[in-house]
């Protein structure tokens, strides 16, 4: 009997914690990062990508642009959410800021912090992405999630998708990894 009560209390505590964490992500500008903070995080994330991914530096330099989310938080207990703020870079300079938000329901329990990179390999896809105030993966366009192989290598010869995504530095336990349904919204930062 004690075992069932203990499990139930843990589940309630995790659910309450996830709700508080998720509601904190959505609390708006009071918790939003400044442009300077996002740029510093993006610089660090790009440096990490270039160190950890074999050929990463030249790959990024040859792209049309990239959207870097240095710190994406994901948590859930039944209901889940994911949120991060990032910098859109072209030719090494930040041109816009975006947030990413994804909600989910289903079997999930835990949390993680990760870095997400959207790399634009096609000028037209980048232009369509940047034209609006918002863009949804799987609806407004597709994003191919790339896995980094053994030794940190990527096969750039077989990348034919106009937008590819990389996820690095995952910590914590999470059941599902997908960008499908993620909403990207342009932010006006100073």
Image (cartoon, rainbow, N blue to C red):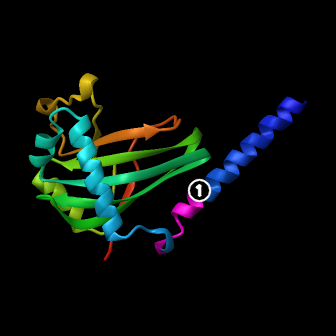
Q: Taking 167 as reference, is 26 left or right?
A: right
Q: Residue at x 14, y 35 (%)?
A: 55
Q: In the image, residue 54 lies at what x, y percent? A: 19, 32
Q: Which residues are magenta?
A: 22-29
Task: Please say whether residue 140 is visible from this viewpoint.
Answer: no
Q: In the image, residue 78 lies at what x, y percent? A: 62, 44
Q: In the image, residue 143 lies at what x, y percent? A: 28, 45
Of residue 24 and residue 177, the one placed in the foreground of this image is 24
Q: Residue at x 34, y 47 (%)?
A: 116
Quadrant housing residue 159: top left
Task: Classify 34 as above or below 19.
Answer: below
Q: Secondary structure at mark 1?
A: helix
Q: Which residue, given by chain and number where applicable, does mark 1 sit on?
A: 21
Task: Please say whether residue 6 is visible from this viewpoint.
Answer: yes
Q: Is residue 62 magenta?
A: no
Q: Residue at x 84, y 32 (%)?
A: 4
């Amino acid at each position: 009997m004690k075992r069932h009560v203990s499990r139930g209390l843990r589940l309630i505590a995790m659910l309450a914690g996830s709700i508080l964490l998720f509601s904190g992500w959505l609390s708006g500008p009071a918790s939003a990062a400044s442009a300077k903070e996002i740029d510093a995080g993006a610089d660090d994330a790009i440096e990490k990508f270039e160190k950890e991914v074999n050929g990463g530096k030249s790959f990024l330099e040859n792209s049309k642009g990239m959207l870097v989310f240095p710190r994406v938080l994901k948590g859930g207990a039944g209901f889940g959410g994911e949120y991060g703020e990032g910098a859109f870079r072209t030719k090494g300079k930040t041109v816009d800021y975006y947030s990413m938000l994804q909600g989910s329901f289903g079997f999930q329990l835990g949390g993680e912090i990760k870095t997400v990179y959207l790399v634009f390999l096609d000028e037209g896809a980048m232009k369509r992405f940047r034209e609006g105030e918002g863009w949804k993966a799987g609806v407004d366009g597709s994003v191919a999630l790339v896995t980094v192989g053994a030794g940190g290598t990527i096969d750039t010869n077989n990348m034919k998708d106009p937008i590819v995504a990389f996820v690095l530095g995952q910590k914590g336990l999470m059941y599902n990894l997908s960008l499908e349904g993620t909403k990207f919204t342009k932010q006006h930062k100073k």
